[in-house]
Amino acid sequence: MRMRREVETTTAVAPPARSPGRPEGLSMHAVRAAVSRARTGDPAAIALLRQVAGEGATAAPPTPAPAPCRLTPTTAPDLAGDLTDGEALEATRTLPAHVQRSNIGSDCQRREFMRWAREWFGTYRAAIEHFSAIETANVPGSPLVHRDARARLEAVAAELAGSGGHMPSTSTAFAFRSTFAGKHPSPASMHTLGYALDYDAVGMPQMGQDEMALLIELMTGGPANAQILDYSRRRDAIRRMGDRTAAGTETALASDRNATAVLSGITTELARLTQASTAFQAILGATARDEFLELRTQYFEAAAGDRAAVLARVQPLLAPLFAAIGRAEGEAGLSDARRAMLARLRTKLTDAAFLFGAARRPRGGGRPTTAQTHTSPSLAQLFEHGWFAPGDQGGHWGVEFATAMARHGFEGGYVWGGATQDSMHFELVVARPYTPPRAPAAASTGAAGHGHEH
């Protein structure tokens, strides 16, 4: 194990410029590269720079040593034939420029990234091979994705073009959305791996709050997410569909009951969600809804000391919501967990942020409204826009796109439940390449993240 790498040391070296001892034929580019390696403690590079400096040569004062890297302890064992730590660091400099620009600038960040990546892929070599395959897909928006996802996406676009369907546009796909210190791989890493994309983030926001998902259920008679098989059967079916479509063997689809259930479920459940999203906007009735949105605007306009009074005027308008909570609390066999969530929802309905969200103040004047957000939408946002709004222009996506994506191996986050309902999100269903030993409990947080990582 490389647990010794928890604390990395560095060595100060003298600049080699204009040194009389520079060996003949050694370019200044090579000397600069040796300086970079020497700062990581590479013995061969240090020896080369001493030769460059020359015995007895007058050297410039040594450069200050960078602060040591304090790396997260790794869960992955060393494997014979893999790159060394130093070789892995240097290999990151060969990655595509769009990968290197994504939160792995310093050597310490690169080492943390490679430590994390080896935990995903088992070896440094496999990790470098994977991230060298992050490419630009030739689809609207030119998103960056892994080569495997690129081929599937381009096939989806070609299929939709042939049928006259709409291929939405996005540029939100691969990214290292944070550095990797203290992080270990998690199921929320699909954007980090280049397997996930987001489409129409504002029109299809991530629910973000279990209480809002519960409120939708109470007021529309159904869950806020699509009900399509269970997790394992659905994922397995989508992966099989993608593999068959890529191999040109779709004829086997008819005998795959779970695959056909996924495709039919997309049609029926997305129609239900669209209808429920529209219906939710009218649950107060037109007059009470308009009064609610007016009080929202007055709340944003009011001085801090006057806001409580405005908020109190909202509560009577929400009587249908409180009544629904009361009915749910009276159901037979109510679990403690659901009772607790209903209580939290009741409290949330008195909270201005849950009700109104953040203010959007028009430039040049005008009354404030609610700023639309791509995660944790407020009640005001749902009253004005809903949470599920398919479309056939620009970045909007519809049922035909969702069906094509499933046939080519992509699962949509519209099937996830509760706070994780994430209709903007599509990810290629892939098997995890490697399962390392369990991470230490204190450091077992997910890697970069949109809920499922945005």
Image (cartoon, grey):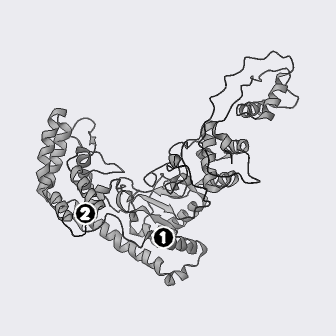
Residue neighbourhood size for the residue with mark 1, other residues' Cα within 10 Å, grouped as few (<14), some (14–19), many (≥20): few
Instruction: Tell me which corner region of the image, top left, top right, bottom left or bottom right, holds residue 59.
Output: top right
How many discs mark residues in the rendered view? 2
Nearer the observer, 302 or 353: 353
Kind of residue indicated by mark 2: Thr
Between 290 and 37, the one lying in front of the other is 37
Residue 379 in the image: state x and y as whole percent. Answer: 24, 52
The numbered mark at residue 67 is none
Residue at disc 1, secondary structure:
helix
- First along the sequence among labels 1 and 2: 1
- Cα gap from disc 1 to disc 2, whole angstroms: 30 Å
- Kindly check if marks 1 and 2 are in contact, taking CB atoms under 8 A apart as contact: no
Q: Quadrant of residue 219?
A: bottom left
In the image, residue 118 sits, relative to residue 168, either above or below, namely above
| Residue that numbered label 1 is attached to | 232
Picture coordinates of residue 355 (x, y %)? Answer: 23, 49
Which residue lies at the image location 70% right of the left edge and 31% below the top edge? 39
Residue 384 visible within the image: no
Is 229 positioned to the left or the right of 108 in the image? left
Give the residue at the far top of this rendering.
Answer: 58
Mark 2: which secondary structure? helix
Residue in front for this viewpoint, 313 or 445: 445
The amino acid type found where label 1 is placed reads Ser
Most extreme residue toward the bottom, as rendered?
Answer: 255
State the residue lying farthest toward the right. Answer: 24
Left or right position of 312 against 77? left
Residue at 47% x, 73% y is: 233
**Can you identify the residue that label 2 sits on?**
278
Q: Does the image show residue 40?
A: yes
- x, y percent for residue 113: 60, 45
Instruction: State the image coordinates of residue 301 (x, y, percent, origin top left).
Output: 18, 37
